Image: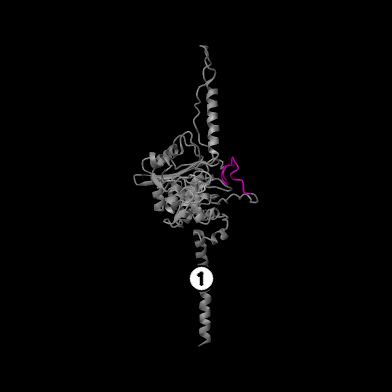
């Protein structure tokens, strides 16, 4: 996912590279005069950032721009609470590289500051780095929006595109005012082409951006993704935005349990509708439909790739989550705060997947549990923020509210039944 500052940063980077190349070349030979020998190339190998001291235990690194400055009159959100016991197991409380006993050395050229390789089916965490360190998700947070939309919206409902959809910041798939789109088509645009306009259109049906974010965060808490807080539906940076390699792996595993999500991220090309001419623009012509392509390089280049989700902002850097299957085994890989150097994120993911598939099938350093596995879900001391009841009242309950409602009914029943029985006994006694 790209924001409007990316091109400026790319231009500055290109200028720096060209300048460095000129300087490194040394004096130039003129009219046969011998010049000094150029400096020898550096042989220092690339090393992934060190996180052993847990620098991101409570929140992501400082923002480099104003994207997370709160609106006037609004306070910056406080960091999310950190569980007393690490979710997923004791070893996942470590902040550096966490490998199984006797595991081989990691592959080279992994620039991701945090990453995780896990088993989609068993939930076993095979290897990881800074698993609960908090980083910005960028467009990978669309995985969380996808789960909410897939479990809430009528996929065959037709939505009319708006100018507000077309005007959103960042990557857009090409929604136009007056265009007619099913929610199924919008979801394809969301996960395949990372359309922020598609995210806006889906969020509008959930009650608007604010309500959609509340629903996303409620779902994250209900799944025990305690490092995660969405600030925008699309993944554009905003105050308090956060996730972790563990949480993103957990959310992706949940999404992959939905057959349509798994189908969409595995789709290479999809036909997207056009939209009519704008009557306000003289001479505007009809905008025909067009194909959209999946932006995940792993899908095209890695045997057995199942698909995934890419992301990028200036503050988040490169983010990535994907899965692949080999010999009946499905593994997922997550990267946070990566760079395109020394190799692209999908190539880093490919190397980590190869590493995971080569490990013993019983190797594990932790778990991504189901809801019934309390042994690795306990989080004593965690302060969970209250749900936004006002936002939910207009759109109906989310999963977290159903849990609370069920608990209230159970408690109420335990209190009410004895009272009713006592009242019945009292009436019968009086009429005997």
Q: Is residue 186 magenta?
A: no
- Which contiguous range is marked in magenta? 55-71
- Residue 32 point in image, percent of width and height: 51, 11
Residue at the top extreme of this rendering: 32
Q: How is the image coloured?
A: one colour
Q: Residue shown at 55%/35% (left/top)?
A: 9
Q: Secondary structure at mark 1?
A: helix
Q: Nearer the viewer, residue 132 or 251?
A: 251
Q: Is residue 58 magenta?
A: yes
- Residue 4 point in image, percent of width and height: 54, 40
Above-or-below relation of 268 to 400 = above
The number of numbered discs placed on residues in the rendered structure image is 1
Q: Answer yes or no: is residue 298 visible.
A: yes
Q: Nearer the viewer, residue 237 or 186?
A: 186
Q: Residue shown at 52%/30% (left/top)?
A: 14
Residue at the front extreme of this rendering: 282
Q: Answer yes or no: is residue 116 visible.
A: no
- Residue 30 point in image, percent of width and height: 53, 14
- Residue 34 point in image, percent of width and height: 52, 13
Residue at the right extreme of this rendering: 73
Disc 1 packing (10 Å; few <14; some 14–19; many ≥20): few
Residue at the bottom extreme of this rendering: 432
Above-or-below relation of 66 to 182 = above
Above-or-below relation of 432 to 354 = below
Q: Which residue is mark 1?
A: 413
Q: Is residue 114 left or right of residue 72?
A: left
**How would you classify the magenta stretch by its main secondary structure?**
loop
Q: Nearer the viewer, residue 332 or 238?
A: 238
Q: Is residue 146 left or right of residue 82?
A: left
């Amino acid at each position: 996912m790209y924001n409007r500052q990316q091109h400026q940063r790319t231009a500055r980077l290109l200028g720096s590279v060209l300048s460095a190349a000129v300087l490194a070349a040394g004096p130039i030979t003129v009219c046969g005069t011998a010049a000094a020998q150029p400096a020898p190339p550096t042989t220092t190998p690339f090393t992934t950032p060190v996180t052993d001291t847990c620098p991101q235990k409570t929140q992501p690194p400082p923002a480099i721009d104003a994207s997370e400055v709160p609106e006037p009159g609004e306070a910056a959100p406080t960091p999310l609470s950190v569980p007393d016991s690490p979710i997923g197991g004791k070893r996942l409380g470590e902040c550096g590289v966490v490998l199984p006993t006797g595991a081989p050395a990691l592959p080279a050229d992994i620039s991701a500051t945090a990453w995780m390789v896990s088993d989609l089916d068993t939930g076993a965490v095979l290897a990881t780095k800074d698993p609960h360190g908090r980083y910005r998700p960028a467009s990978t947070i669309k995985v969380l929006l996808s789960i909410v939309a897939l479990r809430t919206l009528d996929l065959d409902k037709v939505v009319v595109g708006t100018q507000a959809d077309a005007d959103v910041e960042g990557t857009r798939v090409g929604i136009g005012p007056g265009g007619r789109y099913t929610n199924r088509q919008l979801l394809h645009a969301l996960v395949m082409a990372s359309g922020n306009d598609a995210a806006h259109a889906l969020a509008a049906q959930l009650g608007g951006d604010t309500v959609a974010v509340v629903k996303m965060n409620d779902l994250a808490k209900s799944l025990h993704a305690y490092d995660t807080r969405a600030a925008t539906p699309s993944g554009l940076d905003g105050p308090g935005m956060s996730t972790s390699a563990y949480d993103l792996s957990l959310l992706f595993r949940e999404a992959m349990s939905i057959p349509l999500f798994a189908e969409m991220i595995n789709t290479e090309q999809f036909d997207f509708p056009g939209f009519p001419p704008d009557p306000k623009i003289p001479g505007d012509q009809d905008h025909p439909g067009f194909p959209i392509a999946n932006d995940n390089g792993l899908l095209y280049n890695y045997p057995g790739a199942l698909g995934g989700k890419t992301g990028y902002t200036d503050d988040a850097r490169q983010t990535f989550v994907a899965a692949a299957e080999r010999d009946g085994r499905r593994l997922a890989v997550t990267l946070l705060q990566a760079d395109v150097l020394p190799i692209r994120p999908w190539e880093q993911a490919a190397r980590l997947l190869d590493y995971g598939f080569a490990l013993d099938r019983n190797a594990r350093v932790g778990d991504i549990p189901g809801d019934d596995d309390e042994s690795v879900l306990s989080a004593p001391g965690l302060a969970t923020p209250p749900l936004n009841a006002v936002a939910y009242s207009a759109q109906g309950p989310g999963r977290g509210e159903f849990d609370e409602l069920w608990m209230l009914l159970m408690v109420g029943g335990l209190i009410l039944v004895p009272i009713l029985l006592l009242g019945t006994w009292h009436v019968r006694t009086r009429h005997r």
